[in-house]
Image (cartoon, rainbow, N blue to C red):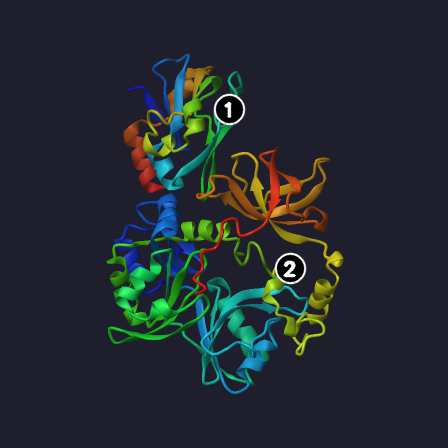
Amino acid sequence: MSIQFSKDHEWVNSADANAAVVGITVHAQDALGDVVFVDLPAVGATFAQGDVAGVVESVKAAADVYMPVSGEVVEVNEALRDDPSLANSDPMNAGWFFKVKLSAPAELDALMDEAAYNAFAASA
Amino acid sequence: MSDTELLTTPLNALHIELGARMVPFAGYSMPVQYKSGLMAEHQHTRQAAGLFDVSHMGQLKLIGADAAAALESLMPVDVQGLAEGKQRYGLLLNDEGGVIDDLMFFNQGNDTWFLIVNGACKLTDIAHIETHIGNRCQIVTLPTQGLLALQGPQAVTALSRLVPGVEKLVFMSGGSFAWNGAELFITRSGYTGEDGFEISVPGEHTEALARALLAQPEVKPIGLGARNSLRLEAGLCLYGNDIDSTTTPPEAALNWAIQKVRRSGGERAGGFPGAAKVLAQIDNPASLSKKRVGLIAKERVPVREPAVLENLDGQHVGHVTSGLLSPTLNQPIALAYVQPEYAQPGTEVFAMVRGKPVAMVVSPTPFLPPRYHRG
């Protein structure tokens, strides 16, 4: 299982450690409501785990997107920028935010698996 | 405030049954959205008819031969000249001319005036009214009364099916109607910019009426989230955001609510709290230090309160008091206070969003043409 989850409600699919995919969870998009805007990081920017790497906004609220793992942004989802509602309709696939070249893969060990995240989200 | 201390409206069980997401608002547990979500609810209200629970708002009556004159002594608006059967927008002011609350008042005849005030302000409003005019009229609060709003181009079709005769009302008029043994007080008004109605209904009949309205094919339930985006598109102020005790009516661009009879040279000029300051500001607009305006962004980056506004030189010229992405225009819109030299339509200012400037243009409000039924 290569998809893991952060306490900030991001998921990361690290099947390719040179281009780990990051998005927001089903729970996060549901709490936010209809997403109308995303601000994505610049390709080539580097972030530490926990840094604010982007913004996701609905009509009623704005939320920061935190880096679930340290690394360099190697690609962003331009389709999401054009159609932010993908974050609602397909948050785990077509609604991905950006891809990261991991600089500290050991950080993945501290993230949650799906069952642990679902329990965390249900209790939040 | 913890959930256990929150008050509930007569529709609480219905909201939960309908799958609403409940949030604390004005001391009440209120639906922020239902299952279809803010965007769908917003569009449904613009296209068909939306039902809103606004039972958290304060309802009260002022009764007595002196009630109109007494109420007029608290507000810069023409109360005594309002015809029976008509509704008007009013503003309670403090001694500095700041807005204590905005409200709707209605002349029900027989020296009876029906008021609807903001939920978050109702206790202080009632105390203010009792302190200042409690000796001049009877004040009857209606804490158990429900209040529903039915808004949208098909509201009249849906409501007139249940309550024949409401189709004859025009914007800002109203009257009493019977429904299933309940007495309803219905006005043709609202907070969305659409044609629609507000229905005051006894608490014990509120859920039955809401269910009967929701059974109409045009009607869906709408939460507070869409209520806010709808009112902002309509250019209507939200008390606590766009007006408060530190803003005067001229600063808030609400001079339209001050009829000539209460202005300098009018038959009943002044005689309300803060009159000297408010009338001086109307007579000499150049004396204003800030003015409320509408803004539309030139790019699609949402701008929210309390974003700072700057000019081209990076100088602070104002701040946003309400802002969101307009679901109808698909562009960010906002209400803001700016220095008067930046208040002309067409003026460009820059909202600072996460440290980056977003160009916005001062624009007339409402942002959409209103669709009130003026008859």
User: The numbered mark 1 sits on a residue in which chain?
Assistant: A
Q: Where is residue B109 drawn, in percent x and y? A: 45, 82
**Crowding at label 1, few (<14), some or many (≥20) Cα neighbours within 10 Å?**
many
At 41% from the left and 50% from the top, the residue drawn is B226
Q: Position of residue B147 (x, y in %)?
A: 38, 66
Q: Is residue B357 left or right of residue B109?
A: right
Q: Nearer the viewer, residue B368 or B225?
A: B368
Tell me: residue B375, above or below residue A58.
below
Residue B146 seen in the current view: no
Do the CB atoms of the residues marked 2 and 1 lie less than 8 Å apart? no
Using the image, tell me which numbered label, if any, was put on residue B246: 2
User: Which is nearer the eye, B173 or B17?
Assistant: B173
- Identified at 46% across, 26% down, the residue is A67
Residue under label 1:
A41
User: What residue is shown at x 33% (from left), y 25% (from top)?
Assistant: A93
Image: B168 above or below B356: below
Give amino acid for label 1.
Pro
Q: Residue at x 70, y 42 (%)?
A: B316
Rendered image: mark on residue B159: none
